[in-house]
Amino acid sequence: MLKTGSKRLISMVVLMVFMLSLSLVAGCGTADQPATAPADQPADTRTVIDQAGREVVLPMEVNRIATTWRPCTFLVFAVGAQSKLVGVDGGSTSTPFTKGVYPQIADVPQVGDKKHGINMEELVAAKPDVVCVWSGKGSEDMVKQLETQGIPTLVIIPESAEKMKEATLLLGDVLGCKDQAQKVIAYYDQVIADVTERLKDVPEADRKNVYLAGAQGVLSSCGSDFYQHFLIEKAGGVNVAAAMKGGWQNVSPEQIVSWDPDLIIADPYCKEGMEDVLKMNPGLKGLSAVKNNQLYSFPAIGQWSFPIPQSAMGILWLSKTMYPEQFEDMNIEETVNQYYQDFFGKNYTDLGPTDLEGKGIAKNINDAKE
Amino acid sequence: MMPKNNKKVGLAFLLVVLTFCLSLFCGRYEIEPSRLVQLLKLAPAEWLNQADASVFYYIRLPRIILAMLVGASLSASGALFQGMFRNPLVSPDILGVSAGCCFGAAAGIILSSYVAYPYLIPLLAFIAGIIAMSLAYGIAAVSRGEPIVMLILAGMVVGGFFSAGLSFLKYMADPYEDLPAIVFWMMGGFYRANWDIVTDLLVTLLPCMILLCLLAWKINVLSLGDEEAAALGVNVRVFRLLLIGVATFMVAGSVSVTGTIGWVGLIIPHIARMLVGSDHKLVIPMSMLIGGAFVMLMDNLARCMTTSEIPISILTAALGTPFFAYLLIKGRGKEWG
């Protein structure tokens, strides 16, 4: 017991030292410029390979970037290049996180998004050096139109942890923010290693079964092909819906009863309250999670369940929620604030009303959802 | 009576020209009116060399033309179906064409992972739309009963079948890549516009439109009912099939490029009929003109009202329906006897 306690202390110290070493990062300049371009290219351009494997010719120094969907906007923030945003996806100008960290975002034009289409003229008028687009499908027409306007596009696909890291490093490279990109990824890996270390003495049999209540309400969850599944795994939990495929899917109440999860955790996008669900499905009242009051909601600010480096905080929060004894020495509020202070120059708790305890699944808790 | 109605068609034509000119000036990319006049004189070789010229010629202009074409063809085919089926509730997707197109597009989106043909999605959508209509027509032809009722029922059956197929494809689709792309496609809009699409559509739709105008008097005869039409010496089966074929081409062509755009094909023919009466020689061209102008206007709003795009179907429904209601209240309601 003493042994695991001291190990935990060591990992804590390592984490603290690591975080202190970051404390001067917040924001990134254009200082670290990439290596020189090959000889057969104009001197002021260079070629990068995007995540679809396309060769993209970019200006040597990218100072204007436009994003067309939310996770990508958050990735630009993650590498500290938010001041280079000249166009963002609809709605990203007013989330508590983006607004709180970078108030000037209010003046950045919204160019539409993946769901509702892109306003091409608005996007071109923003004169971006490069536009980040989502993977292939549904974006071909946009890529083609931008080509005629001489604007290069960068395909970003942060769909798994590996791809997300790759995307972060790629954006860091393109935007001249390699340093912060590497640090934010290193920190992400560090958190996962720390969580694994803390949980290594929790036997398989005691691992918590988690039901993630998802985007379509409490009666929907995500299978093993979404990033949220990975979050649960890395946080040391078992996703009861792992066998499902196809992202968010509706789940029957009977199925939930047969899974009988130890915890029910609501994704930031879940807008339903547990009380209403129980009223309509009294059969769910017998669930262990309901009887033991093991109902939680993800903190609504910062998109911790997105495939972005900031999801490190999501893993930490999930793990602490499932195994509070393993995290007794950690003050989650301090850790999260330190993280946001280091990478975004602002305390997390100053971004808006948040509930880091996350107790309960209330209807209105995620009204401030991003 | 006649000359007055001809004048109305002339006015509608003027409206289309004016709307088109107005649309040229609308857009989120700021182009001064004086600069725009200069751009219009620019030689095609110069289009790509100047930033504002390339926006104007490669983003704005094809989009305006696409909106006009689609508006005109949806409205005209709506007018045709309403007239032929003698039913004011009919819209162009009555024979399951739209449902077929949506199914084809979804299949195309999923298959595009394996087939590298850039126009796979509209092509499959178009083909599936035609297949849907052929099925509906085939079912109606071999079934016993009043042909028009059978056609409408068969259309519902085929539409329902393809909708189920679409739901199945959505269920099976990859949630990261395919599903959002399918949902996005279904929403409909003109943001896909480029010259390839516009020229393809022009080649498909223009002959159909001309043919429809030329055959309009047959619709008058067909709308009298099968027996009367036959008594007047019109080969009902041949002409009905021909007209349905033409309209299906127009609907499938439009939907396969822009997705489903609601209400246009239902409302515009009514407006046209309220203006010029029930003679299809006038109703068809009038529907085309008003439809083209209406959709161009709605798309101007979709493009220009906010920095993001507003889905076009929201606008066509939200602005089209109150106007339609106004006409219903004000109108004399004589057109449908």
Image (tube, rainbow, N blue to C red):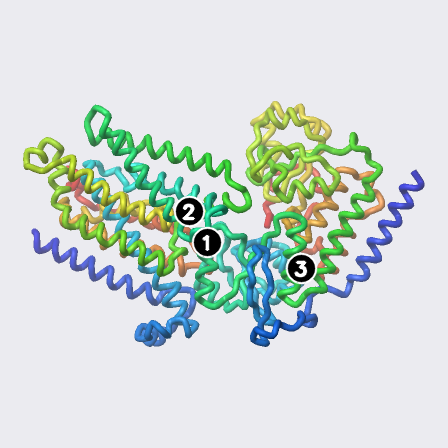
Question: Does dot 2 land on a helix, a strand or a loop?
Answer: helix
Q: Residue at x 58, y 75 (%)?
A: A44
Disc 3 or disc 2, which is closer to the eye?
3
Q: Is residue B332 above or below residue A63?
A: above
Question: Does dot 1 land on a helix, a strand or a loop?
Answer: strand
Quadrant of the snapshot with the N terminus of chain A: top right
Is residue B44 something one can see in this rendering? yes
x and y percentages locating residue A184 in the rendered image? 72, 57
Q: Which quarter of the picture shows residue B134?
A: top left
Q: Is residue B48 above or below residue A239?
A: below
Q: CA distance from mark 3 to mark 2?
A: 34 Å
Q: Which residue is mark 2?
A: B187
Q: Is residue A9 above or below residue B47?
A: above
**Dot 2 amino acid type:** Met
Q: CA distance from mark 1 to mark 2?
A: 9 Å
**Dot 1 amino acid type:** Gly
**Dot 3 amino acid type:** Leu
* Disc assigned to residue A169: 3
Question: Does dot 3 land on a helix, a strand or a loop?
Answer: helix
Q: Are marks 3 and 2 on the same chain?
A: no
Give the crowd class for mark 3: few <14, some 14-19, many >=20 residues within 10 Å: many
Give the crowd class for mark 2: few <14, some 14-19, many >=20 residues within 10 Å: some
Is B245 on the left or on the right of B35, as rendered?
left
Disc 3 or disc 1, which is closer to the eye?
3
Is residue A302 something one can see in this rendering? no
Q: Residue at x 59, y 61 (%)?
A: A49
Q: Residue at x 47, y 68 (%)?
A: A150
Q: Which residue is mark 1?
A: A117
x and y percentages locating residue B194 in the rendered image? 38, 59
x and y percentages locating residue B67 in the rendered image? 32, 56
